[in-house]
């Protein structure tokens, strides 16, 4: 059942629908993905599983996604109109440029950002951009973040899981966090396939992708960043994680209890004492979107334990373009003010959107 | 605040507290664990991390756990009395005998089961046993299951994560499932440290244990068993998973959506079409305990999406002996009948306990 609301202005429900984890990719990058996935010298089974499939599969799902990723014009706007999405916050799809060697990755990030900036310029009331970076060259990544935010008008940074097997809790990446805090923009930590050091038991069961592997790897990545003390060092820094918080809100009690117990017993001499329990960072440094989870129990759970001011709507276009799911979210039996926060006002605040122009 | 209710009979709250994921270990096995963990030839970083710590650490946490595991007598009963636990359902601690070579493992399982059976015989109103097995020798594991259930009076089977790097969705282990279904007893799938093919990104951040790695590995293991079609082949088979369902209830919507989408697009040619969506198996073949999660939001979430008849209380003694947590659960603002199901009647049904003698 397609939602017939006209986008562009507050509809009769009293809120705009702003979708906050939406993806695009230049056609030339998708070609590179396929070439990379087929490189016999590449030792990255997660990338091969992910893009070896999407870039080449004749299945309707893969074809729809490829067409949707490439389009920043009429098709995307039609799909938004058909589902009542007023505005998309768009990022380069996973794994972005994070799989390539540093110089190429840095150049590809610039190209992708220029393309997205053009689309935002053409449709300012419909699109907002996140800046893609190549963390494998941190100094240039910081420069591109600054260009993306200050020159191109983007409102967030996209980071897609590990960069060539490395997680971003490593201090060599902390300049990215320092820059994001200084620029006052959030970092969206988007899933990628788990790295080769972890993926095998997922892959051999077909569970490495969005069905499970994405979520646990992104949860692990976010926890590594918390446990490394990144938010103690950069207390104003904000992250965003999708998929109902990658289950971290659900694990909240156990994370707090076991992290404290582990520290107290000195099980890992390298483990840092943090300024707060893990739940503090979930509630003060992390926003959550419901991408892929159009399900009231999980959304409401997040609102209840993390706070309704930290939970935002996302469709995950074009990966999960399911018109019925907009209705599921519209029809949630939650307070009207929480629903408006979820669909509209949290995103306006987090991405500093100019509501008047939407 | 210690709960002062006298155990042994229904207390003034109207329910008995039956704890369903409680652990023990023979002292001789703990000695073998330490020896095994220190074996330079052992390539199992998860076991080394887990038992290299617990078996040797001078920390109060590790010492309390070691003492608690070894005791099946007065200390355990005192701790149960002090927290108002009427009855424990007890299993050999993780990873049981699953790390040893088959002949030794089979013998150690028999010894552990005999020891537990003696304790149950000495305290029949306070203890119920689960039978430990050595899946690395499936034929003898089935024999020991039959002995444990029929001769020793145990009421469930304990399985601790992977067996030497192998998950139990492999068809070579399905005779265990056939036997459990025939014996009409549930299998408790308890966490273990992730296997070496997966653990590295958890381990290097100190997240391989109960804080996070246990949960995602057990969730993966349960999903592998579901996706392999085990419950289509053995539809009456029942599993139990702890820690509020290892987050699988929270992932329910995404599991259903993405498993169906993955199958439909034929991404993995080996992936099986199942008779039902994944949520069906969560609701019909899996019981959940709240071990480690004395937290109303997660417990209530499980009751709401899986069903109150499938959610049971567990303390996780001696790993999480926290008297206050009994009070947290007692004071949950849920319907009285759901609380009685949670603390008492579900466990009575699942483990076929004779209430009259408790």
Image: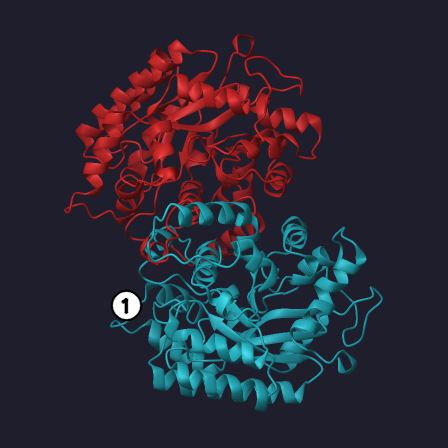
Chain colours: A cyan, B red
Identify the residue position indicated by label 1 in the image. Answer: A43
| Res A256 seen here | yes
Res B34 → quadrant:
top left
Tell me: B316 left or right of A325.
left
Q: Tell which of A104 and A265 is nearer to you.
A: A265
Res A195 → quadrant:
bottom left
Extreme residue in the bottom direction? A151
The chain containing the residue under callout 1 comes to: A
Residue A286: image location, x then y, percent? 58, 63
Residue A91: image location, x then y, percent? 55, 76
Q: Residue at left 50%, top 17%?
A: B352
Tell me: B138 left or right of A212.
left
Residue A105: image location, x then y, percent? 39, 82
| Res A93 seen here | no
Residue A78 versus residue B350 in the image, above or below: below
Element assignment for label 1: loop
């Amino acid at each position: 059942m397609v939602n017939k609301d006209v986008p562009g202005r507050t509809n009769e429900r009293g809120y705009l629908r702003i979708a906050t984890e939406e993806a695009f990719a230049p056609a030339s990058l998708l070609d590179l993905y396929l070439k990379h996935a087929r490189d016999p010298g590449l030792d990255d089974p997660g990338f091969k599983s992910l893009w070896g499939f999407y870039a080449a599969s004749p299945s309707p799902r893969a074809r729809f996604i490829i067409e949707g990723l490439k389009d920043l014009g009429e098709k995307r706007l039609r799909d938004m109109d058909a589902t009542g999405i007023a505005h998309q916050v768009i990022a380069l799809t996973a794994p972005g440029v994070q799989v390539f060697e540093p110089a190429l990755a840095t150049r590809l990030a610039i190209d992708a950002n220029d393309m997205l900036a053009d689309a935002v310029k053409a449709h300012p009331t419909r699109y907002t951009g996140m800046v893609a970076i190549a963390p494998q060259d941190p100094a240039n990544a910081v420069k591109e973040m600054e260009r993306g935010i200050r020159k191109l008008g983007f409102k967030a940074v996209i980071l897609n899981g590990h960069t060539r097997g490395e997680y971003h809790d490593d201090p060599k990446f902390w300049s990215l966090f320092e820059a994001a805090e200084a620029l006052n923009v959030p970092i969206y930590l988007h899933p990628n396939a788990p790295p080769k050091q972890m993926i095998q038991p997922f892959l051999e069961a077909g569970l490495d992708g969005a069905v499970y592997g994405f979520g646990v790897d992104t949860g692990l990545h976010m926890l590594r960043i918390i446990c490394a003390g990144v938010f103690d060092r950069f207390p104003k820094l904000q992250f965003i994680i999708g998929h109902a918080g990658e289950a971290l809100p659900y694990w909240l009690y156990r994370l707090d209890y076991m992290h404290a117990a582990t520290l107290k017993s000195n099980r890992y001499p390298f483990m840092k004492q943090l300024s707060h329990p893990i739940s503090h960072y979930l509630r003060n440094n992390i926003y959550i979107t419901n991408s892929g989870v159009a399900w009231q129990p999980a959304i409401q759970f997040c609102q209840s334990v993390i706070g309704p001011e930290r939970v935002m709507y996302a469709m995950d276009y074009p990966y999960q373009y399911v018109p019925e799911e907009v209705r599921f979210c519209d029809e949630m039996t939650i307070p009207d003010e929480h629903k408006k926060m979820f669909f509209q006002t949290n995103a306006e605040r987090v991405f500093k959107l100019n509501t008047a122009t939407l």
